[in-house]
Amino acid sequence: MGTRAIYIFEDDHNGLLEGEVHVYKHYDNYPSGAVDFIENAKEYAWELPRFEADEFASAFVAANKNPKGGEVRLVSNHLNGEAEILEAHHWCDYHYIIYWDRYFKDLWIEVQESVYQKDGSVEWKTIWDGSHTQMKEKYRECSIAV
């Protein structure tokens, strides 16, 4: 069974620009794996600080796709109707919000983990909120080989 996640790449987290792109990844999405997947995407993306959600999401897919396919892909939210992306993918274990933070001059990562309630519903608990550099320091000592 995979540790599934939705990665949400946002153009401007503060709301000045609109635009976000969603990527689904099926395996190894604990923060220790995600930190490496995000790092891998930098090799395929424009050099930071240039950051556009659609371009970085495409780089993420290119960097982390299984050559046989199926493990990581862009997700279109229009298939979910009015449902929010996380509501529509409530069965995922994690979701990551990734954007360029102009103040810290680094990628900013918000990590939320699913917590199942007694009534069967899912709530999302924030377990990390910080820069990608800080995330690498915290999670990389136990990261997986990718």
Image (cartoon, rainbow, N blue to C red):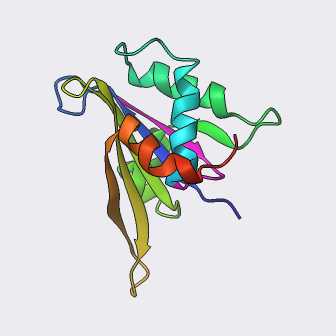
Q: Is-magenta flag for residue 25? A: yes
The spot of residue 108 in percent (x, y) is 32, 36
For the point 48% across and 50% down, which residue is it? 139
Q: What residue is shown at x 77% (from left), y 37% (from top)?
A: 69
> Which percent across, then down, holds residue 13?
24, 33
Q: Quadrant of the C terminus?
A: top right
Residue most extreme to the right: 68
Work out whether 4 lies above or below 37.
below
- Residue 107 falls left or right of residue 73: left
The picture quadrant where one finds residue 8 is top left
At horizontal 64% and vertical 40% (from top left) the residue drawn is 72
Name which residue lies at 58% across and 56% down. Answer: 4
- Horizontally, residue 37 falls left or right of residue 14, namely right
Q: Quadrant of the N terminus?
A: bottom right
Q: Nearer the viewer, residue 15 or 78?
A: 15
Q: Quadrant of residue 65?
A: top right
**Image quadrant where residue 125 sits:** bottom left
Q: Is residue 34 above or below residue 105?
A: below
Q: Nearer the viewer, residue 139 or 25?
A: 139
Q: Is residue 75 visible?
A: no
Outermost residue on the bottom side: it is 118
Span shown in magenta: 20-30
Give how far across and how far down residue 104 sits, in percent: 23, 28
User: Percent from the top left, x then y, of residue 115?
Assistant: 41, 72
Front position in the image: 58 or 143: 143
- Whether residue 131 is in magenta: the answer is no
How many numbered circles are shown? 0
